[in-house]
Image (cartoon, coloured by chain):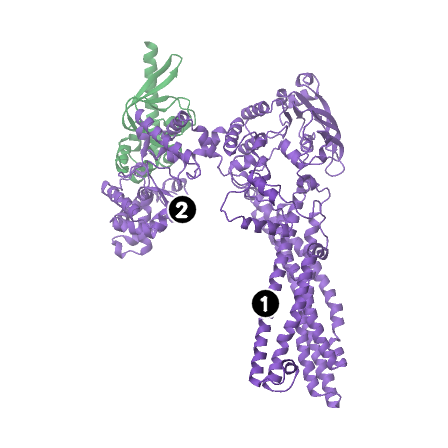
């Protein structure tokens, strides 16, 4: 897959929708492309967070460790941005992400990600929106589980 | 000779000839005594040759006169008397002319022989002096190195004594030759007229009186110049050693100012010296001209008065002209001699510190007492560096040599000094230490250096590889002759002869010095395995394995290892295929483009084995350019290069200059950005033919770094890849013979000598697209090597890892580990450690300490500990306080309320 296709994928992610193409190209060019086999971990809870991931193809489960073993809290598909929390806050990974199919991801380094957030406020706003949404979804799920 | 032959046949070398003058020879304080002591005989030869040259030179001067006066002018004379009157004039002329030719050649020949002999003598004496000075360094007491710096000592032996050699060669011949000439001419003048002879030499006493007076000041200046230049070397050395501090403290201006001041002093001195030298010169030439003034005035008066013929005056003037040249040479010689005297004395006085090690203890072949004895007994041992305050004061104890003893104490308790004293690295200033029934101070180095090991806190590693550093403790004497080009030993004989002529040691450093039996192994291979074991023991096994994988081996030297690595290659490939992980590595395939490799690698399809096909400059190589043209890639690459430049400019143009991304990702640096922007503008719309040569080359070079799988720019289309494959074939097919050694082609069946062990096993490129491919592969490779029992072989290959200058390519902790292993390999009866492992992390310190003590079980260890808690592992503990033994006993005995040990443990 070429750089231009990757730029297209980035454009489809709401957070990056309003960013000029040359910046998206920089983002795509400086990110790495990694393939994961089904069942392989992108990262585990507690790892040090050094990069964020964008799913280019395939699907993944987000799980958190509980006393009763891993609990799946979310499911991601194409165009999802994952793992940005750990690189934003310098805390260890708050969840484990595991590929549930063969998965292709763009891997964005912490440094690059910060540069983007600093330079383009709209990305920061989009991240906030995304985080709020995700928090709400997670809360809903916990409510659901505790009720059950 | 017969003895040494049989010994060589038995595979062992005879002991090297130690310098002929014997050990502990004093350095002559004066250069004249040095010359007389070591070259009396040779100086006599020089003298004889000089004397021989006189009549020959005289004849070359005399014959032309005879030819003109007697042969051409046809008068009678001495030549005619000798050759006989009856000779015809032509024959007579020819005889004299050929005689002249003969003496010219003879005089040239004698001069040549004399020069060569004197030159060689000078070189021999220089070599001897340098060797003597170097030997002295090996005998300096260790504390002396706190007072003198490398920067001072090195130029003394390298530069300062250099002119001494040249001088010694001519020391007798110059004054003798020119002195002789002077006498001859003077004799001639006096024979003509005593009065004029007196006039000609009237000013000589004045010159002889005045010149040394002036010279004296120059000599003094020369002395301070030597001192200042040494200081300069010292300053430069300090700046290099302290470069980090200079940068970190913004002190570069301060340092520059310091150097400028030093340079100013040198400048002033040098200026003063040559001002005075020219003044002397002026005075000399003035006096030389003053004498003809007297000739004209007095001689002219005598001629007019009729007391002298005009012919006699002309003859005397001509003789005087001849006189001035040897006189000048003699004065020059005097100046040179004075200069050299200063230089020699200034050097030699620096090499005579008090307390030099006894050289007999180093040179002896006596390996000391057979048995170590059972104890090391220390009675009232004291040490004081400045002669006043004692850092070790009246220490008395006895240590069992089959037990492990810890010395604990605060940093200033004297435990550092005590460790050095017990290792006989410094000498005590009071009391005594006895080992093997002798005073420690009297034991020869072949005993202390072989039976004992010492490891200090800041080990030095020599800038070779790990192997040579590890077996450093086994190289005491040459044991087996060097294997090398056979020339019947002629080279070796010459070497020995010349070494002895300068009283240098004649041992061959290229011989095999390693004493395998001292390490308890039969040969090199077993020693390598032992080195690996010891490095494992000191926690360096993983690093060693990594060094091995990233190192290269010569399949010529180790065909078995190369073969084994090929087996590992096959095993890894089948393992990858079986485990469905084949995508982790993209193998090299002659018929396919490797998308995880650069275009350069794809084109070369091999590893550069020399500098010709260096990847960074591959596009510039004429042969590569030819190949590109033949494959029809020239225009294509130009176009790809242009697109690549456009993309880079688009992506990176907005980044601030110097941003880290340039280094990491861009095809050119930020400072080149404007260049490439101009290049794009300049070449826009131009065809290849219209472009400047350098523009074409620049654009064509860029795509050589493209890796499709990594850069994902889509620039290298399938057609281009196919064309590169064609170029690959052309490259291999038309490679000229002289370039064949410059590239090692990828071949699945062959070991690639230019590539690392790891790359040989992988035989392909790690895939960029697979998550954590490198980590997964290194695990798999480890498994493969383990399954083939090759991990150790890889570690042995790691012994060839170069440690850099002073071990700088290793971390401080790694250096300490190597040093501990080095101490263990020679299987010492007593291992003395001063801290030794302080740079390791806490857990590793404990592991290595335990491992070393385990290895030394039943043998003696004395360990000056930086962490008193470690003393728990020792049989016995000696607690030092202010240089005195505060208490001693087992750890359990001493570990009680209020004890000195408890106090130390609590502050840890």
B557 shown above or below A79: below
Question: Badge 1: how crowded within 10 Å, few (<14), some, or many (20+)?
Answer: few
Residue B637 in sight in this render: yes
Q: Label 1's element?
A: helix
- Residue at the farthest left position: B719
Chain letter of the residue carrying label 2: B
> Residue B346: horizontal and vertical position, in percent?
69, 53
Q: Nearer the viewer, residue B311 or B644?
A: B311
Q: Splitting the image into 4 quarters, where does residue B278 fall? A: bottom right
Left or right of B133 in this view: B851: left
Relative image position of residue B665 (x, y in whole percent): 36, 40
Looking at the rendered image, the disc whose residue lies closer to the viewer, 2 or 1, is: 1
From the viewer's perspective, tell me whether residue B563 is left or right of residue B418.
left
Residue at image mark 1 = B109
The answer to which quarter of the image holds residue B119 is bottom right
Q: Is residue B606 left or right of residue B261?
A: left
Q: Earlier in the sequence, mark 2 or mark 1?
A: 1
The quadrant in which the C terminus of chain B is found is top right
Display colour for chain B: purple
B645 vs B84: above or below: above
Task: Tell me the quadrant of the picture where the N terminus of chain B can be found.
Answer: top right
Residue B841 placement (x, y as % from top left): 54, 27
Marker disc for residue B610: 2
């Amino acid at each position: 897959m070429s750089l231009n296709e990757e730029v297209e994928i980035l454009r489809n992610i709401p957070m990056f929708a309003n960013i000029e193409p040359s910046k998206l190209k920089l983002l795509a060019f400086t990110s790495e492309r990694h393939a994961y086999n089904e069942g392989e971990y992108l990262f585990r809870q507690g790892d040090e967070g050094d990069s964020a991931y964008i799913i280019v193809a395939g699907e993944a489960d987000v799980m958190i460790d509980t006393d009763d073993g891993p609990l799946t809290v979310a499911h991601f598909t194409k165009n999802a941005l994952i793992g940005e929390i750990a690189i934003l806050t310098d805390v260890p990974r708050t969840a484990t992400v595991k590929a549930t199919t063969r998965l292709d991801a763009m891997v964005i380094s912490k440094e690059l990600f910060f540069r983007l957030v600093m330079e383009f406020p709209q990305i920061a706003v989009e991240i906030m929106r995304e985080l709020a949404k995700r928090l709400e979804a997670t809360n809903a799920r916990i409510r659901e589980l505790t009720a059950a | 000779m017969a003895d040494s032959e049989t010994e060589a046949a038995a595979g062992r070398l005879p002991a090297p000839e130690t310098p002929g003058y014997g050990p502990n020879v004093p350095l002559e304080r004066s250069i004249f005594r040095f010359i007389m002591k070591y070259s009396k005989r040779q100086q006599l030869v020089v003298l004889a040759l000089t004397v021989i040259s006189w009549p020959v030179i005289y004849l070359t001067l005399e014959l032309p006169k005879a030819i003109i006066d007697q042969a051409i002018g046809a008068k009678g004379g001495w030549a005619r008397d000798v050759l006989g009157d009856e000779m015809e004039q032509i024959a007579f002329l020819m005889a004299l002319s050929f005689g002249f030719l003969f003496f010219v050649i003879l005089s040239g020949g004698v001069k040549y022989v004399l020069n060569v002999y004197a030159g060689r003598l000078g070189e021999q004496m220089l070599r001897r002096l340098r060797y003597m000075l170097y030997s002295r360094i090996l005998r300096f007491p260790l504390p002396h190195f706190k007072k003198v710096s490398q920067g001072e000592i090195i130029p003394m032996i390298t530069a300062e004594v250099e002119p001494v050699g040249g001088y010694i060669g001519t020391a007798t011949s110059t004054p003798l030759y020119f002195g002789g000439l002077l006498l001859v001419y003077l004799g001639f003048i006096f024979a003509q007229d005593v009065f004029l002879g007196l006039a000609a030499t009237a000013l000589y006493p004045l010159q002889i009186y005045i010149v040394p007076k002036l010279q004296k000041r120059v000599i003094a200046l020369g002395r301070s110049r030597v001192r200042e230049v040494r200081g300069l070397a010292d300053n430069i050395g300090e700046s290099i050693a302290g470069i980090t501090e200079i940068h970190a403290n913004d002190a570069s201006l301060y340092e520059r100012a310091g150097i400028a001041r030093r340079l100013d002093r040198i400048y002033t001195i040098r200026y003063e010296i040559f001002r005075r030298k020219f003044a002397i010169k002026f005075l000399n030439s003035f006096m030389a001209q003053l004498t003809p003034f007297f000739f004209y005035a007095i001689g002219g008066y005598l001629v007019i008065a009729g007391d002298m013929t005009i012919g006699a005056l002309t003859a005397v003037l001509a003789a005087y002209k001849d006189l001035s040249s040897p006189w000048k040479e003699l004065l020059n010689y005097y100046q040179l001699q004075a200069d050299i005297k200063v230089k020699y004395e200034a050097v030699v006085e620096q090499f005579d510190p008090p307390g030099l090690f006894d050289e007999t203890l180093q040179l002896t072949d006596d390996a000391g007492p057979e048995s170590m004895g059972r104890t090391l007994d220390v009675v009232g041992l004291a040490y004081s560096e400045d002669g006043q305050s004692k850092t070790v004061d009246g220490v008395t104890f006895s240590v069992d040599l089959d037990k492990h003893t810890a010395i604990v104490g605060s940093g200033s308790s004297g435990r550092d000094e005590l460790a050095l004293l017990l290792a006989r690295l410094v000498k005590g200033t009071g009391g005594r230490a006895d080992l093997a029934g002798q005073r420690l101070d009297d034991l020869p180095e072949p005993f202390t250096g072989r039976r004992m090991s010492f490891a200090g806190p800041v080990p030095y590693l020599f800038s070779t590889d790990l192997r040579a550093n590890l077996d450093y403790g086994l190289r005491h004497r040459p044991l087996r002759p060097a294997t090398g080009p056979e020339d019947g030993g002629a080279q070796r004989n010459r070497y020995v002869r010349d070494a002895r002529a300068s009283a240098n040691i004649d041992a061959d450093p290229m011989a095999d010095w390693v004493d395998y039996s001292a390490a308890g192994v039969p040969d090199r291979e077993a020693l390598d395995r032992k080195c690996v074991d010891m490095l494992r023991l000191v926690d360096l096994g993983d690093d060693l394995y990594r060094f091995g994988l990233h190192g290269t081996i010569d399949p010529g030297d180790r065909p078995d290892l190369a073969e084994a690595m090929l087996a590992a290659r096959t095993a890894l490939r089948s393992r990858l295929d079986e485990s469905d992980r084949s995508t982790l590595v993209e193998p090299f395939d002659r018929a396919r483009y490797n998308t995880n490799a650069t275009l350069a690698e794809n084109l070369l399809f091999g590893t550069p084995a020399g500098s010709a096909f260096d990847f960074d400059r591959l596009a510039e190589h004429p042969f590569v350019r030819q190949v590109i043209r033949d494959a029809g890639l020239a225009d294509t690459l130009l176009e790809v290069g242009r697109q690549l430049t456009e993309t880079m400019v688009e992506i990176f143009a907005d980044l601030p200059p110097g941003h880290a991304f340039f280094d990491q990702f861009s095809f050119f640096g930020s400072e080149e950005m404007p260049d490439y922007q101009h290049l794009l503008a300049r070449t826009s719309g131009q065809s290849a033919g219209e472009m400047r040569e350098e523009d074409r080359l620049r654009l064509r070079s860029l795509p050589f770094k493209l890796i499709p799988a990594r850069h994902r720019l889509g620039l290298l289309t399938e057609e281009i890849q196919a064309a590169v494959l064609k170029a690959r074939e052309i490259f291999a097919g038309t490679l000229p013979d002289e370039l064949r050694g410059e590239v090692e082609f990828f071949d699945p069946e062959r070991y690639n000598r230019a590539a690392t062990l790891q790359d040989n096993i992988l035989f392909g490129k790690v895939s960029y697209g697979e998550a954590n491919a490198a980590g997964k592969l290194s695990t798999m490779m480890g498994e493969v090597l383990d399954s083939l029992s090759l991990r150790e072989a890889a570690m042995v290959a790691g012994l060839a890892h170069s440690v850099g200058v002073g071990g700088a390519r290793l971390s401080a902790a790694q250096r300490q580990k190597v040093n501990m292993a080095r101490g263990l390999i020679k299987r010492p009866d007593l291992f003395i450690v001063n801290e030794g492992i302080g740079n390791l992390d806490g857990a590793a310190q404990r592991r290595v300490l335990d491992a070393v003590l385990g290895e030394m079980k039943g043998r003696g260890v004395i360990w000056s500990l930086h962490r008193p808690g470690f003393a728990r592992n020792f049989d016995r503990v000696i607690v030092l306080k202010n240089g005195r033994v505060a208490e001693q006993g087992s750890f359990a005995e001493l570990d009680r309320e209020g004890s000195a040990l408890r106090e130390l443990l609590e502050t840890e």
